[in-house]
Image (cartoon, helix red, strand yellow):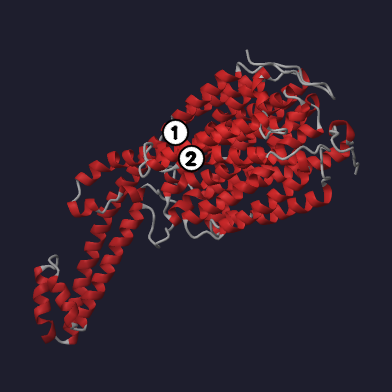
Amino acid sequence: MATTTAPSGTRIDYTTALDQPTKMIILVGVLLSLFLSSLDQTIVSTALPRIVADLQGIELLAWVSTAYLLASTAMVPIYGKLSDIYGRKIILLFGIVVFLTGSALCGLSQSMIQLVIFRGIQGFGAAALTSTAFAIPADLFAPAERARYMGLFGAAFGLSSVVGPFVGGLLTDNISWHWVFYVNLPIGLLALTFIIMKMPKLDSGVRSPIDYFGSITLILAVVPLLLALTLDKTQHAWGSPLVVGLITLSVVGLALFLFAERRAAAPILPLHLFRNRTYTMVNLIGVSVGATLFAAIFFLSLYLVNVLGVSATEAGTTLIPLTLSLVFGSIVSSAIVQRIGRYKVTIIVGMSIIVASLWWLTTIQIDTSIWMVRLRMIALGLGLGPALPLLNLAMQNAVPREDVGSATASRQFFQQIGQVVGSAVFGAVLTTTLTSSLAANLAPIQAELPPAMAAQIDPSALRNGSAGGEGATGQATDPSARITQEITAQFTAQRDLLTKAIRDGDPAAIAALKANAQTPPELLQLLDTVDALPAAARDQALAGALQGLDQAQATAIAQGEKIGGEISLAVKHAFTESIASIYRYASVLAIIALILSFFVPELPLRRGGEPAPMPVME
């Protein structure tokens, strides 16, 4: 393996200092770490319906992702700068260790609150993985050469997205959702071993001072803002002291951060880059695409499981066409850009396909076939494939080499800001529209039922949906199955009571039956004379009573299944309407990103050590 050294303060140009075999070994290690972080996102999304049904916390559903993104977003720029100072390898190893610790703790979660906290630990480690994974290719390859390798990053993401949902569904259906987190451990240990043994330090040779004040003020600016956005507004309204206080704290943190970055010798987020039009446009697009991508994938499994009624495994496999088309689009578009040396048209085409695909997703119905959902996913993947990696290429090509690490990390930072805002906004849209849709769809059913029975239909409980099987209380989560379960339990108890009263002459059982207003008159007469009947007559009377009870149970179950079917249909309509509305909002964001992509400058791809042009804002 080739090694390089340089005097302190001299930047090492790895594009020329390393030979091709060494570069490929490093690239494999990077792809392994990227595979690990992206696998976690795809494998968890498949298990979310079962997690919600088990832990009963749909109001915290968005926080499962938000906590992860909150920690990850705040740390991405910081890790990016630290990797410039201390080398990519040590930051990557630290991130993997923290990520695996968080994964183990997530698997041990016994409540939604615990899961949310441990997902935050995962995100703290994942930030190191993503910030270094996307920066290292910029260290190894010149932009003109880098285009051909962009498809590999799409392939790594695609492979994890194919394996993740399938394995996640398989583990959820056959073992437990807890194992979707444990599965990270062997893969992470493999990546850890490979990086320790094969990857060089990848140190730039530059020793700039750490921007401690910038790091602290960045966290102070980002975390309170994201918390204010993601708090449940039914409990903490926009005008509440907590939300206003968090926003105020964020504004103060932002002012201090800008003050710090203007005076820092090595700022975490170089402010002069915002004069670069490509840098600014790509980051604005990243915010929109981040929120859009979150909506497109995160809520799909809820629709598949709760509306189409598929298993977690099948819900996972439905995402496979998305990732395969994403990989195909990424590889083909990278090859096209490598050949023609131009990227802007390809980005615009990709963004246009994303807009059309999201609008197509707004047309989902309760009877949409799973194959039509897969076709929508294929179309979305064909748009994401060209757009995501080429936006990264455009930015790296437009900034000076000494700012590539910070610029790449900041792009990831702004995209994750979009994801967190998307999780907050779309999570609020889901809970708000789902509650109102459930109330509207259930109202006609409740109007036809006796008041006592209508009061037992709880829309807030039905918001958790049905993941099949049984929930944490041991009850069936499907309305029809739950009603049947309750009816069967009631009639079983009635049989036991009849047996004790008629066969055994139990005074307590006889008193309970007489106190029940629904006990038939003929049974009341029998109970008055049961003590005087011989054993054979008692057995005959009991058999007749049980036969009548069987007929009553069959009638009750038929009525219950009818009511349960109507409730299930109402729940499906509510979920469909809510998720379709989310895709409508996501379409608007995608249109904004498409418009912005027209303003991204088309710059020649640099080769070798050519300096980067600096297109300034007009």
Mark 2 neighbour density, 10 Å: few (under 14) some (14–19) many (20 or more): many
Say what amino acid the circle numbered 2 marks: Phe
Question: Where, by quadrant of the figure, is residue 579 drawn?
Answer: top left
Percent x, y for residue 51? 48, 53
In the displayed structure, 617 sits above or below 549; it is: above
State the image quarter where residue 106 is shown: bottom right
Residue named by callout 1: 582
Which residue is the site of mark 2? 299
Mark 2 or 1, nearer chain start? 2
Q: Amino acid at mark 1?
A: Ile
**Side of 614 relative to 260 (left or right):** right
Q: Is 488 displayed left or right of 409 in the figure? A: left
- Looking at the rendered structure, the secondary structure element under dot 1 is helix
Question: Can you say whether 122 is above or below 319 in the image?
Answer: below
User: What is the number of the mark on residue 615?
Assistant: none
Residue located at (63% from left, 25% from top): 282
Residue 136: image location, x then y, percent? 76, 37
Contact between labelled residues 1 and 2, with CB atoms less than 8 Å apart: yes
In the image, what residue occupies the spot 44% across and 28% down?
A: 584
Residue shown at 59% from the left, 29% from the top: 286
Q: Position of residue 32 (x, y in %)?
A: 73, 45
